Image: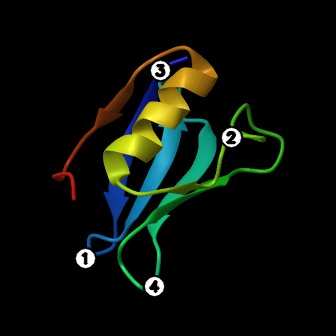
């Protein structure tokens, strides 16, 4: 399953996760201390059970790709 990753808000610390049909899968958030990223799966989504804490945004996206067997497309922003 492919995932579309879209920044939310203006601070560059949160991203919305959706499948290509627009169904919500969860969020990625930068931790308050700013040196890690957490995946917050939507309850009941196929992301349930994915490892939560990752050192980089790229690592979080890779974990999602491995879990779902597809790709993550980051749209409308740049990676941290």
Helix, strand or loop at mark 3? loop
Pointer 2 residue = 50
Marker disc for residue 32: 4
Judged by depth in the image, the label closer to the viewer, 1 or 2, is 2
Marker disc for residue 2: 3
In the rendered image, residue 29, in percent from the top left (x then y), is placed at 47, 66
Q: Earlier in the sequence, mark 3 or mark 2?
A: 3
Q: Earlier in the sequence, mark 3 or mark 4?
A: 3
Q: Earlier in the sequence, mark 2 or mark 4?
A: 4
Task: Give the residue drawn at x 52%, y 39%.
Answer: 18
Q: Is residue 45 above or below residue 41?
A: above
> Can residue 19 be seen by looking at this rendering?
no
Task: Give the residue drawn at x 60%, y 21%.
Answer: 68
Task: Tell whether 66 sits left or right of 76.
Answer: right
Task: Give the residue drawn at x 52%, y 35%.
Answer: 63
Mark 2 and mark 4 residues within 8 Å of each other at the beta carbon: no
In the rendered image, residue 11, in percent from the top left (x then y), is placed at 26, 78
Between the residue at mark 1 and the residue at mark 2, the CA separation in whole angstroms equals 26 Å
Q: How many marks?
A: 4
Pointer 1 residue = 10
Helix, strand or loop at mark 4? loop
Q: Earlier in the sequence, mark 1 or mark 4?
A: 1
Q: Is residue 61 above or below residue 36?
A: above
């Amino acid at each position: 399953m492919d995932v579309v990753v879209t920044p939310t808000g203006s601070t560059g610390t949160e991203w919305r996760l959706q499948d290509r049909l627009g169904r919500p899968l969860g969020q990625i958030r930068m931790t308050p201390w700013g040196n890690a990223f957490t995946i917050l799966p939507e309850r009941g989504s196929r992301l349930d059970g994915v490892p939560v804490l990752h050192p980089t945004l790229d690592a979080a996206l890779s974990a999602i790709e491995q879990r779902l067997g597809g790709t993550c497309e980051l749209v409308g922003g740049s990676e941290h």
